[in-house]
Amino acid sequence: MLRFVCWLTLLLKLGLICAYRPVFIYHGILTGADSMQHLVKRIQLLHPDTVVYNFDRFGGWSSLENAWHQVLEANTNLQAVCALHPEGINMIGYSQGGLLGRAVLQTYPDHCVRTFISLSSPQAGQFGDDFLHLIFPSLVAKTAYQLFYSYVGQHTSVGNYWNDPHHQDLFDQFSIFLPYVNNRLYSANSTQFRETMMRLRRLVLIGGPDDGVITPWQSSHFSFYNETNDVVPLQESPIYKEDLIGLKTLHDSGRLDVISREGVHHYQWHRTDHVIDSVIIPYLD
């Protein structure tokens, strides 16, 4: 009997060791939870019995609602998941969902996320016609600031992270979201926004030159245009050099992975098996 109890205890311990952490997935703009089902199924195929929470709010046109509204509402969902899994979870945010998902972490001081995977997300902002025309066909990047840097424009998520390198004064004056979550502008929450990023065991930034939607594509790595439209590399940017949200600290401690893949279009990152297998699955423990 004693031997049986010992074997049972060992099996239970092995089961706990081998079990994969739950995964929280945040969808992109103008889509919803359904668009992430291929990724959900792939994770559960390769990591059987993984519990996956596929965020199902703010789908379709409601994904254009003000970014802060979406973040604070999603925060309640993540809190509920963390209450169920205090041992920790992994989180994947795709496209806009990667930016908003990162902000959800920053507004949740005691979050339980161990690894955050940003999958082709405009972490440093967005500035480009291709993306813009998917949502606002009549706008062009050159003049979009006239709409987005206004009271009306800031009611849209896109306006909240539109980053025009030629109108940085207006960006700082009107944008109520991106300059703050990136600690470009100081706020009462700046310390918290950095410290919550420091809770991560790993931050994974994924993007590539053939993305075709995130502009510049290096925004997925926190790099962005300067006033002459040259992309400033991450390690030369103020957000990194000044360690505004902890990216340098994460890098120096071996907790920041920056991944680039050629030949992957924006809509393939979460729908192509070999891409999922190579850049996402290895980080799901």
Image (cartoon, rainbow, N blue to C red):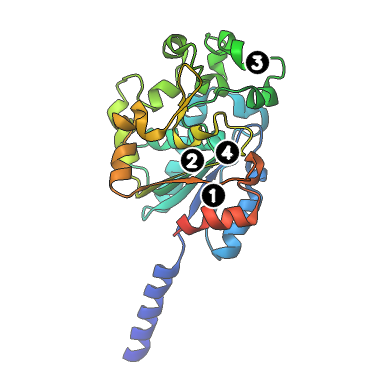
| Mark whose residue sits in front, 1 or 3 | 3
Mark 1 nearby-residue class (10 Å; few <14, some 14–19, many ≥20): some
| 114 in relation to 247, above or below | below
Q: CA distance from mark 1 to mark 3?
A: 36 Å
- Tag 2–tag 1 contact (CB < 8 Å): yes
Question: Mark 2 belongs to which amino acid?
Answer: Asn
Q: Residue under label 1, please give it.
A: 53
| Mark whose residue sits in front, 2 or 1 | 1
Residue closer to the observer: 86 or 113: 113
User: Of the numbered discs in the image, which one, if any, rests on residue 77?
Assistant: 2
Mark 4 nearby-residue class (10 Å; few <14, some 14–19, many ≥20): some
Task: State the quadrant of the N terminus.
Answer: bottom left
**Regarding mark 4 in the picture, which secondary structure is present there?**
loop
Residue at 53% x, 15% y is 154
| Mark whose residue sits in front, 4 or 1 | 4
Q: Residue under label 4, please give it.
A: 209
